[in-house]
Amino acid sequence: MKNRRSFFKKSLAGLAAAGLFPMAKNASAGEKKLKGVLVHHVYFWLKEPENKAHRQQFENAIEKLLKVETIKLSHFGVPAATEKRSVVDYSYTYSYMVIFDSIKDQDIYQDHPVHHEFVEKNSHLWEKVLVYDSVDEIA
């Protein structure tokens, strides 16, 4: 009987924890804010987006670029298959986002030999590039 009660208590505790876990996860999601960082978001339009060799070269070059030591977080991707809306631009080939701890770290990245090599060896692949840099210092 004692084992049965113990099992029952543990089961209820487990169910309660499982039920609250998703709420705790959702509650903290809004609290995950990037403070004091610089977000560097780059959109690339390749000249020949269907050219597999060019895409492979570009993707390999990005992998190398992501090794620059001042990059804290990164994301590299393609347009998502989300609902079509007039405010969403799906025309780019690649999206590249890196986050730095400071403008100084982004300056180091911009002048890094790996970044210079990336531009020198791959700029012939793209027809357009747009860069958006942002910080959370709103005046």
Image: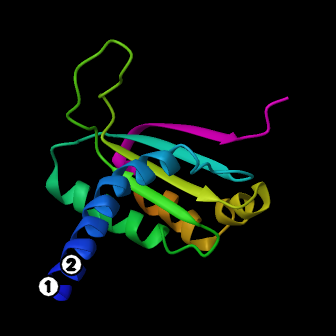
Asked if one can make out residue 123 in the rendered structure from this viewpoint, the answer is no
Residue at image position (28%, 38%) is 79
Q: Is residue 91 above or below residue 42?
A: above
Look at label 1 and name its amino acid.
Met
Mark 1 residue element: loop
Look at label 2 and name its amino acid.
Arg
Q: Is residue 85 above or below residue 93?
A: above
CB atoms of marks 2 and 1 within 8 Å? yes
In the rendered image, which quarter contains the N terminus?
Answer: bottom left
Q: Position of residue 57 (x, y in %)?
A: 29, 63
Residue picked out by circle 1: 1
* Residue segment shown in magenta: 124-139
Q: Is residue 68 left or right of residue 110?
A: left
Residue at image position (52%, 67%) is 117
Residue at mark 2 to residue at mark 1: CA–CA distance: 6 Å
Please give the label number shown on residue 5: 2
Residue 104 or residue 125, whichever sits in front: 104
Instruction: Please check the rendered image and state whether residue 121 is part of the magenta-colored stretch, yes or no.
Output: no
